[in-house]
Amino acid sequence: MALHNPLTQLSKRATQTQISRLTATPSASIWPSKAISMGQKQQASLIPPVMQDSTGAKGPTAMVFMNMGGPSTTDEVGDFLSRLFADADLIPLGRFQNYIGPLISRRRTPKIQKQYAAIGGGSPIRKWSEHQSSEMCKILDKMSPETAPHKPYVAFRYANPLTEEMYNRLLEDGFGKGRGGRAVAFTQYPQYSCSTTGSSLNELWKWRQRLETKRAGDEVDEAGAIKWSVIDRWPQHSGLVEAFAQNIEAKLAEYPEERRKDVVLLFSAHSLPMSVVNRGDPYPAEVGATVMAVMQRLKMSNPYRLVWQSQVGPQPWLGAQTSDTVAQLIKKGNSDLVLIPIAFTSDHIETLYELDEEIIGEARESLHKAGKDGEGVKRAESLNGSPVFIRALADIAKAHLDSGESCSRQMGLRCPGCVSEKCLASKRFFAGQESLISAAA
């Protein structure tokens, strides 16, 4: 929902008596020794919902969901791939990136267009991202009336709405440009990687510098810029784990009881180039932490493996590859397999086409050719509109808003092999926002 007036004129504020009655949140010190754990589930207070004509003492708050994105139509595929292969944070192609990237994207566009056509003509990730952010903000208005109303925004790295579009919308809606205001960049990659969350934050920082500093062409008072904070990772949050576990249990229930405990669970995450892994990227460890938390919630009910998908190009990538693992397990006699997209928060091309059509489709076909039942190869549902997952998003956001932190302590630690000045400047900017957030508390 858009804001059409400056922040100071958005709506009638609640009275001080109302604010005092509805809020009793202690202030948090910088980097508190007993900071709220992102892995603990927060409970909402039983309070009246914030009405659309009321604003909390610290509101409104923009909640910006960041993700890779995907083309909503087949006509958008070319531009999507061009941006993707131009991003050295995601797919490092060396000093010839500006030449090789466009070449790869042009060659791949017809093939990828056919894949998107096969799943309905476009990616559903925008639909799900807008739904998740909107529903989360409704819950958050009730949980945190002092920072309400919470306004949902979506910023994609490679598809519409792009980060630039989102930032300009924030400015049009009354945030920034001398009017201040608070915004939270909420990564929808639960596990942090410099290639995903890091790239999105670098892009956000770039547009902030272009639109809210002297580079914008005006005499901009930075004290009136948007105050940013970042939810940069949440791999073991109890609500996330519960949502994954419930979807897995629902899929396991489709197997006959006598076969259920022997079904192999294959947790599949987007792979990374080994050059990124070897410089110290935390992503593999954080994905592994999510997998272990889910298996503990399932009481280690089934054998499992963590595998990796979506390798692009000839250079070495993190393995074992999902497709190879499925084929090899079938050869070894394991025909009951459940694939779980563990690093994705909604359906998109990697789930609907790569997993469902290619990997599972080919596995079932090979089993049928061998005279075996191929229906034992399945995929757990993606998180999509799961109420448990959306409530988890609200819990995470509430804990972050209460913490007074601008980002996690972990985000401030650069990869040991990182030499990117852009990454350094971005991290310093977001860490430095904490003093401004604390002053406004």
Image (cartoon, grey):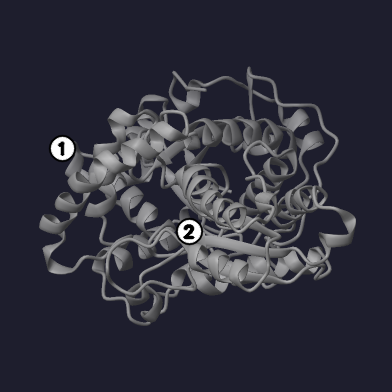
Whether residue 418 sits left or right of residue 239 in the image: it is left
Q: Residue at x 55, y 34 (%)?
A: 128
Q: Residue at x 54, y 46 (%)?
A: 356
Q: Is residue 75 above or below residue 318?
A: above
Per the image, label 1 sits on a secondary structure element best described as: loop
- Residue at the spot 82% in from the left edge and 32% down from the top edge: 47
Name the foreground residue: 380 vs 240.
Answer: 380
Give the residue pinned by disc 2.
435
**Kind of residue sitting beneath label 2:** Ser
Q: Is residue 148 left or right of residue 427?
A: right
User: Is 24 positioned to the left or the right of 206 in the image?
Assistant: right
Q: Give, as a three-letter code, the residue at label 1.
A: Gly
Residue denoted by label 1: 217
Residue drawn 74% across the image and 58% down it? 238
* Pick the front one: 413 or 101: 101
Where residue 1 appears, as percent x and y from the top left, is: 52, 23
Q: Quadrant for residue 24, please give it.
A: top right
Give whichever of discs 2 and 1 has the lower sequence position.
Answer: 1
| Above/below status of 294 relative to 69 | below
